[in-house]
Image (cartoon, helix red, strand yellow):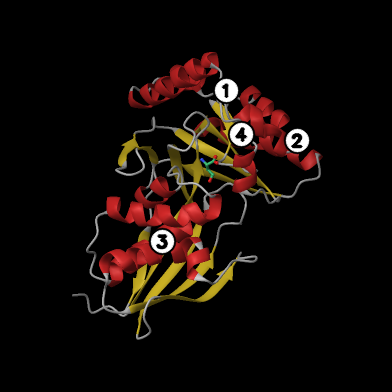
């Protein structure tokens, strides 16, 4: 039995899909993230007492809120004998494609788990957090939840019984990320996707995912570069993001290993050698600025920690 009365967790942003791993591959971006505090309450159930930061209009009904739904799932499963009061501080812009809903859900369950004396392994927390992600996007997917929770580049296999594998990233490779200030709803970006994939695209995409993962394990930058191409989802979504084609071409011309949409967009990312990262960033930035977009930008290490408790008492 933990004596803690409250705990605060930081959960990082993430880039989902990583081009070729739709809904199953993602990496953590801890340059930004959400902070979630959970405290014991005498009232039963789960209550959200505050949402602050880059919050916009977020529901405070726990059943309608990503962090609330995740915390409800944990509360129902563990029956801790107390209620939970939660405060959410959003550091990830809504509708940015940087895994904001996943981070809130992950932060909630990591904080609550610490509060209760850490009864759950991360894999159990993953299942609770997935319930929250479903509120935001209308579907259960794990490519943001897993990296936000585990850190690094993560492959997740399975939904009911997920298996998580942290994939090594070759030394000296980093991510370049540009976020145009535009809201894009994940639901909308999922709704436009065709339900069927031509067999030839399925073969190509499968080869690219296998090539990408094997390239990561064998430090084969040429294989990573050759397979860093989404032939299924990106062609359908790129029209939602003004300037996408120009940004991708510029990144590749500047030496990026690959460039694609972060999650559902509109954020765009590239992988690049550290020595070329600033050149790639400048190349990606230029078409967006020329198109009149305001942007945020980051160059980040790919091997970063996942969610963690940052304060408790
Ligand atoms: N894999 C998801 C998608 C990530 O691309 O729709 C968005 O949260």
Local SS, label 4: loop
Quadrant occupied by the C terminus: bottom left
Local SS, label 2: helix
Q: Is residue 182 visible?
A: yes
User: Circle 1: is it few (<14), some (14-19), or many (20+) Cα within 10 Å?
Assistant: some
Disc 2 target residue: 287
Foreground mark, 1 or 2? Answer: 1
Left or right: 109 as drawn, with respect to 229: left
Disc 3 target residue: 70
Mark 3 or mark 1, earlier in chain? 3
Question: Would you say the beta carbon of the disc 3 residue lies within 8 angstroms of ligand 1?
Answer: no
Question: Residue lying furthest front in this view?
Answer: 195
Cα gap from disc 1 to disc 2, whole angstroms? 23 Å
Mark 4 or mark 1, earlier in chain? 4
Task: Locate residue 171: give its quadrant.
Answer: top left
Question: Residue lying furthest top in this view?
Answer: 200
Disc 1 target residue: 231
User: Circle 2: is it few (<14), some (14-19), or many (20+) Cα within 10 Å?
Assistant: some
Mark 4 or mark 3, earlier in chain? 3
Local SS, label 3: helix
In percent of width and height, residue 104 lies at 47, 60
Q: Is residue 102 visible?
A: no
Left or right: 56 as drawn, with respect to 5: right
User: Circle 4: is it few (<14), some (14-19), or many (20+) Cα within 10 Å?
Assistant: some
Disc 4 target residue: 193
Of residues 105 and 274, the one drawn nearer to the viewer in this rendering: 105
Q: Residue at x 30, y 79 (%)?
A: 82
Of residues 313 and 171, the one drawn nearer to the viewer in this rendering: 313
Cα gap from disc 3 to disc 2, whole angstroms? 39 Å
Foreground mark, 3 or 2? Answer: 3
Question: Would you say the beta carbon of the disc 2 residue lies within 8 angstroms of ligand 1?
Answer: no
């Amino acid at each position: 039995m933990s004596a803690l009365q409250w705990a605060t967790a930081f959960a990082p942003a993430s880039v989902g899909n990583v081009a070729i791993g739709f809904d199953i591959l993602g990496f953590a971006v801890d340059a930004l993230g959400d902070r979630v505090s959970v405290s014991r309450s005498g009232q039963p159930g789960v209550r959200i007492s505050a949402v602050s930061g880059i919050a916009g209009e977020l529901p405070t009904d726990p059943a309608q809120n990503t962090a609330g739904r995740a915390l409800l799932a944990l509360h129902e499963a563990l029956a801790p004998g107390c209620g939970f009061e939660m405060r959410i501080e959003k550091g990830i812009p809504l509708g940015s494609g940087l895994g904001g809903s996943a981070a809130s859900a992950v932060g909630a369950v990591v904080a609550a788990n610490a509060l209760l004396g850490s009864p759950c392994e991360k894999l159990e927390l993953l299942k609770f957090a997935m319930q929250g992600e479903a509120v935001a996007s209308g579907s259960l997917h794990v490519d943001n939840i897993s990296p936000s929770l585990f850190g690094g580049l993560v492959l997740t296999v399975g939904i009911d019984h997920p298996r998580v594998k942290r994939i090594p990233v070759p030394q000296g490779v980093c991510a370049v990320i540009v976020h145009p200030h535009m809201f894009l709803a994940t639901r909308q970006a999922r709704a436009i996707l065709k339900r069927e994939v031509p067999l030839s695209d399925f073969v190509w995409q499968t080869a690219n995912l296998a090539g990408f993962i094997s390239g990561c394990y064998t430090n084969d930058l040429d294989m990573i570069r050759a397979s860093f191409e989404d032939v299924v989802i990106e062609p359908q979504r790129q029209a939602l993001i003004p300037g996408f084609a120009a940004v991708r071409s510029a990144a590749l011309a500047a030496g990026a290993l690959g460039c694609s949409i972060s999650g559902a967009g509109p954020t765009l990312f590239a992988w690049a050698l550290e020595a070329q990262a600033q050149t790639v960033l400048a190349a990606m930035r230029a078409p967006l600025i020329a198109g009149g977009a305001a942007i945020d930008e980051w160059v980040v290490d790919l091997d970063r920690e996942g969610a963690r408790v940052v304060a408790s008492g």
